Image (spheres, rainbow, N blue to C red):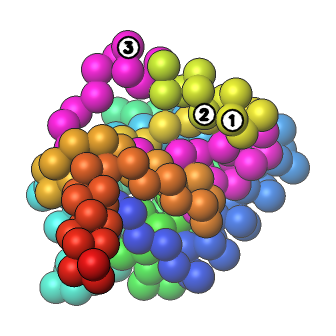
C-alpha cells in the first residue's frame, strides 16, 4: 500500500491532538489549509517523501530539512509544532497517516463525506462533478472525492465511502460472469 494512503493508530492520535488544539484556538480552517499544503508538497516531491520516511537520517536532521523546505509555506505555529513533536518522538515517518487522519476529522467536523474513487482511466472534470452530485443525492450530504487510477479495473468505477464499497467495475462484472459460468 502506498504510504500516502496509510492509516495508523499513532497518526490518529497526533491528528486528534492537533485537531483539538486548532479547534480550541479557533484556527481549524487555517490548520486544515496548512495540512493540505504539506500533503501537496509531499505528493509533489518523491525525494522529500523518501527523506522524511527514511530511517537513515536522525529526527533532528529530518526536521531541519523539512522546516527549510516548508519555510516558504508560512505555516501556522501549531502546524510547525506538530512537525516538531513528530520529530522529537521519532515519528516523522507518520506524517502521511497524520495528514490522512486530520483530513478525515476535518471532513467529519464540516459535514463532508470523503469518497475514494478508483477508475480505470482518469476522470474528467465533468465526470467528477456528476459523480459528486450523484453521491451528494445518495448520501444526503456533500462529498469530497479522492481519485485513483487503476488500469486493472478495465472500465467502470469503485467507490468507497467509509466502510461501504460500491463496485461497478468491468473487472468485477467479468469475474462474476466467469464464476457463474464455472458453476453452470
Residue at x-position 66% and y-position 75%: 13
Give above or below for 121 relative to 21.
Answer: above
Start-end of magenta stretch:
101-129
| Residue picked out by circle 1 | 138
Q: Find residue 135 and name its label.
A: 2
Residue where numbered disc 3 is placed: 126
Q: Residue at x 67, y 29 (%)?
A: 136
The answer to whether residue 125 of the structure is visible from this angle is yes
Q: Report the side of 154 relative to 83 (left or right).
A: left
Quick one: which residue is furthest to the top in this view?
126
Answer whether labels 1 and 3 touch (C-beta < 8 Å): no
User: Can residue 179 be seen in this snapshot?
Assistant: no
Please tell me whether residue 117 belongs to the stretch shown in magenta.
Answer: yes
Disc 3 is placed on an element classified as helix
The tag earlier along the polypeptide, 3 or 2, is: 3
Q: Earlier in the sequence, mark 1 or mark 3?
A: 3
Residue depicted at 22% across the width and 43% down the height: 155
Tell me if residue 15 comes above or below residue 36 in the rendering. Answer: below
- Pointers 3 and 2 in contact (C-beta within 8 Å): no
Front residue of this view, candidates 184 and 108: 184
Left or right of 70 in this view: 27: right
In-front residue for pair 115/171:
171
Amino acid at each position: 500500500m502506498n504510504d500516502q494512503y496509510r492509516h495508523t493508530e499513532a497518526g490518529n492520535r497526533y491528528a486528534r491532538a492537533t485537531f483539538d488544539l486548532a479547534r480550541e484556538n479557533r484556527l481549524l480552517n487555517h490548520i486544515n489549509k496548512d495540512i493540505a499544503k504539506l500533503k501537496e508538497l509531499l505528493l509533489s516531491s518523491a525525494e522529500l517523501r523518501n527523506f522524511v520516511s527514511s530511517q537513515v537520517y536522525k529526527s533532528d536532521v529530518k526536521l531541519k530539512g523539512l522546516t527549510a523546505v516548508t519555510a516558504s509555506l508560512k505555516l501556522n505555529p501549531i502546524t510547525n509544532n506538530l512537525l516538531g513533536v513528530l520529530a522529537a518522538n521519532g515519528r516523522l515517518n507518520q506524517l502521511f497517516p497524520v495528514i490522512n487522519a486530520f483530513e478525515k476529522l476535518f471532513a467529519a467536523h464540516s459535514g463532508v463525506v470523503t469518497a475514494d474513487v478508483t477508475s480505470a482511466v482518469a476522470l474528467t472534470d465533468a465526470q467528477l462533478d456528476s459523480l459528486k452530485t450523484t453521491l451528494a443525492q445518495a448520501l444526503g450530504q456533500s462529498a469530497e472525492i479522492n481519485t485513483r487510477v487503476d488500469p486493472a479495473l478495465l472500465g467502470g468505477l469503485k467507490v468507497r465511502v467509509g466502510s461501504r464499497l460500491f463496485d461497478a467495475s468491468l473487472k468485477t462484472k467479468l469475474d462474476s460472469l466467469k464464476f457463474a459460468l464455472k458453476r453452470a
